[in-house]
Image: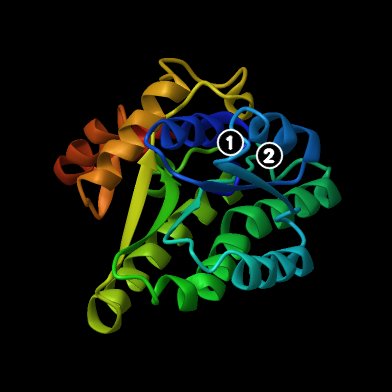
Amino acid sequence: MTGGARGIGRVITRQLVDLGATILIVGRNKNDLDRVAKEHPEQIVGLCADLSDPSQVDHLIKRITENHPEISVMVNNAGVQFEADLLSPAAQDHIANARTEIAVNLDAPVALTIGLLPILRTHDHATVVNISSALAIAPKEASPVYCATKAAIRNFSKSLRYQCETSAPNIRVTEVLMALVDTDMTQGRGSGKITPKDAAANVLAGIRAGRSEVWVGKSRLLRILDRISPALSHRILR
């Protein structure tokens, strides 16, 4: 579980613990990881890694492969979002933030998935869960790079699902299209947010039901609206 020590990831971790799971949580802040792991030391293991650094992602893959080949479920949950007016003068700041978003939201989950597929293939039943967003369907003006990474994760999930259906039917690929959740990342943004607890419950219910796509909260309405009038759904989220 990437991003398992904060926000939605932390709540999903706690709910998985209640179901009896043993979980590896990944994050860049060791204090946050230790704090969560101490709640259930026999069920939670913290792995410190900065997912914006490809070398640390590579090391994480190696570490998990060597020390934790028993994992059968992988949740790519970590994400960062920066709002940016790309036409403003702060070009260098925008470039740095964009690279971070691409690294954490796209490069890391793709690399982790590819790197850990050999482990997942050894199990009778395995699952890859990619946390995407309703913004993968209809982007908002304020966060162009974030929206682009989520659209890319949506297509990556679909293509990977096709390959698993053909060559590794024991691996299920689930995409979660998240609504606006009340976390640190969304502080001061938007309204009508759902709680992390409700979001996590939706995610786990979808996984346990074996769904290929899990539409959380108001994203369910977007799914219907986008079929009826894509132009309207884009106008609303813009």
Q: Which of 157 and 19 is in front in this view?
A: 19
Q: Nearer the viewer, residue 89 or 109?
A: 109
Q: Return the residue found at the far left.
A: 228
Give the answer, above or below, for where 64 lies relative to 232.
below
Q: Which residue is the site of mark 2?
A: 84
At a point 27% along the width and 37% down the height, the residue shown is 205
Q: Which of 169 and 133 is in front in this view?
A: 169
Q: How crowded is mark 1: few (under 14 residues within 10 Å), some or many (20 or more)?
A: some
Task: Say which element carries label 2.
Answer: loop
Q: Which amino acid does the dot numbered 1 rest on?
A: Ala
Q: Which of the two discs, 1 and 2, labels the residue nearer the N terminus?
A: 2
Quarter of the image for the C terminus: give it: top left
At a point 50% along the width and 20% down the height, the residue shown is 190
Q: Residue 195: image x %, image y %? A: 44, 19
Q: Quadrant of residue 221?
A: top left
Tell whether label 2 touches label 1 (CB within 8 Å): yes
Q: In which quarter of the image is residue 58?
A: bottom right
Q: Which residue is the site of mark 1?
A: 142
Q: Which amino acid does the dot numbered 2 rest on?
A: Ala
Q: Residue 22: image x %, image y %? A: 49, 46
